[in-house]
Amino acid sequence: MRGIHLILAHSAEAGIAAVLFFIGALLAPIVYSRRMETFIAFPRWLMRKLRSFIAEEPSIPQLALLIFAFNGSAILLYMLSGVVPGVPLLIALGTGLNVALAGFLAHEERPATGPAARPLPFSVRLCAALTFLLELPCFWYAIGMGFRMPTALDLLHGGDPNAIARRVSAYVMFILPTLLVSATVESYAVLWAARHASEST
């Protein structure tokens, strides 16, 4: 259980990551309303790629695998970015901005009337809530571990490379499985919404 203890030992850093994430999210309405394309371009591209994949009518496992592969690899890289001081701070802020912008972009396409505008069933709302409750803490704790990662300069001057290996091990053992569950419930919610949106057109 060393891995879970290592993760929880970074709770304070995870809290800082969460604060930065929400600051980024709070900036999203300003960026979106002013159409700052420099910041909107990436979430728009990501949403376009996701819509293109969904248009091929994937199964829940197929979409879950895509989301899991993206989140699992991206968040691992975010954690490892701690070898460069300050980068995880910027990533936490930028991710909050991107997630909120993706929400605005997704809302653009939801019809104001018709079946897709009706209240979502409990199962979909539950899966959407679980997605955030599982995925966001994984992100915050991974970033938190990145905050105290030995920097490249530390490693050059005899820092402990095992500190990175221990973080990667904890990530693989505990954070990755949680991200898989999150990706599965997210896939159900996303595909339900996509199917009912198409039925309304």
Image (tube, helix red, strand yellow):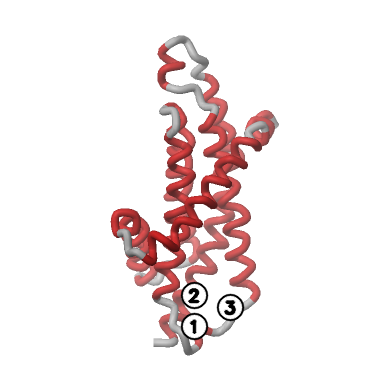
Q: Residues within 10 Å of mark 1 (few under 14, many from 20)?
A: many
Left or right of 128 in this view: 85: left
Question: Label 2 to label 3, Cα distance in Å?
Answer: 8 Å
Q: Secondary structure at mark 1?
A: helix
Q: Which of the two discs, 2 and 1, labels the residue nearer the N terminus?
A: 1
Q: Is residue 54 above or below residue 73?
A: below
Q: Earlier in the sequence, mark 2 or mark 3?
A: 3
Q: Position of residue 18 (x, y in %)?
A: 57, 46
Say which element carries label 2.
Answer: helix
**Residue in front for this viewpoint, 133 or 195:** 133
Q: Is residue 43 visible?
A: yes
Local packing at callout 3 (Cα closer than 10 Å; few below 14, some 14-19, many 20+) is: some
Q: Residue at x 59, y 81 (%)?
A: 119
Compare residues 38 and 70 and report the one nearer the observer: 38
* Residue indicated by mark 3: 120
The amino acid on which the numbered mark 1 sits, given as a three-letter code, is: Ala
Image spot of residue 181 (x, y percent):
58, 54
Residue type pointed to by label 2: Ala
Please name the amino acid that badge 3 sits on.
Leu
Do tag 2 and tag 3 residues touch (Cβ < 8 Å)? yes
Q: Residue 71, relative to residue 155: is it above or below? A: below
Q: Residue, x 56% and y 31% (percent of image)? A: 169
| Quadrant of the rendering where the C terminus is positioned | bottom left
